[in-house]
Image: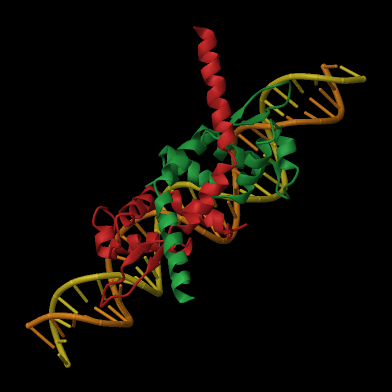
Chain colours: A red, B green, C yellow, D orange
Amino acid sequence: MPATDSLSATFSALADPTRRAILARLATGEATVTELAEPFEISMPAVSKHLKVLEHAGLVSRGREAQWRPRRLEAAPLKDAQEWLDRYQRFWNDQLDRLTAFLEEEK
Amino acid sequence: MPATDSLSATFSALADPTRRAILARLATGEATVTELAEPFEISMPAVSKHLKVLEHAGLVSRGREAQWRPRRLEAAPLKDAQEWLDRYQRFWNDQLDRLTAFLEEEK
DNA sequence: CTTTTACTTAACCAATAGGTTATATATTGC
DNA sequence: GCAATATATAACCTATTGGTTAAGTAAAAG
């Protein structure tokens, strides 16, 4: 069962620290592949593959300017991910409340 | 480079629709493995494996009651995931604003 | 038109993921 | 103690992931 749905693609793309770092870099503005690759000790093709994963999830788009292919952050899928998580917000609040109550009890 | 950090484990766990469905079920309350497996057409061991992934990410905890091992939702890691996404919130707002402005322009 | 720069694609590899069936373990109920 | 129920583990298979090196393409610059 390949995870073809969009939310799975998004979470899957976010599940790698290199890819999250790339997104963090793109949050500061457009960047070329070489610029994006610079902080990492992996090869350019490896970065290309990470970018392809991010593009497939719709998190990054590709421009063209001479021989550069500047990448841009596309945040829309992140919004979907956040909306999915929103539905669980009450649980971590509840659980924190219970923890707080318990610690209060202990005193 | 195996993704050992906690955020990667969380996003990775969320990247599968079966596991998200399990979490959704657990949001309605504790459930046994058999109960959790019921909606899916996969075998019990497959469900067991999904549960192990969720437990490894700290999203689910395991109780014991007679021969049952009821699972419970643990929402804390979801909070971390949301906080990571929070930092991008302004981007999807910005991009929506730009889109709105553009559509306004077109009229 | 050749070289340099900036990528991308192909071919390969080892490790992981997600599934299976078959076998073990633990607890309850007769 | 023995059978039934609930779950876990083992052994196996295939596809995907994340990396590599080597070869291909595209635009700019000499």
Q: Is residue B76 visible?
A: yes
Residue C5 lies in quadrant = bottom left
Q: Residue furthest top?
A: A107
Please tell me whether residue D20 is drawn above or below residue A14 in the rendered image. Answer: below
In terms of depth relative to the viewer, which is nearer, C30 or D16? Answer: D16
Q: Position of residue B55 (x, y in %)?
A: 56, 34
Q: Could you tell whether A99 is left or right of A30 in the image? A: right
Q: Position of residue B44 (x, y in %)?
A: 70, 41
In the rendered image, which quarter contains the N terminus of chain A?
bottom right
Tell me what residue is drawn at x 75 percent, y 42 percent.
Answer: B38
In terms of depth relative to the viewer, which is nearer, B25 or A100? Answer: A100
In terms of depth relative to the viewer, which is nearer, D17 or D11? Answer: D17
Please tell me whether residue A91 is drawn above or below residue B19 in the rendered image. Answer: above
Q: Position of residue B25 (x, y in %)?
A: 68, 39
Q: Could you tell whether B48 is left or right of B79 in the image? A: right
Please tell me whether residue A72 is drawn above or below residue B44 in the rendered image. Answer: below
Please tell me whether residue C1 is drawn above or below residue A19 in the rendered image. Answer: below
Q: How many marks?
A: 0
Q: Is residue A59 visible?
A: no
Tell me what residue is drawn at x 47 percent, y 62 percent.
Answer: A58
Residue C10 lies in quadrant = bottom left
Tell me what residue is drawn at x 36 percent, y 63 percent.
Answer: A72
Q: Could you tell whether B55 is left or right of A51 in the image? A: right
Q: Position of residue B54 (x, y in %)?
A: 56, 38
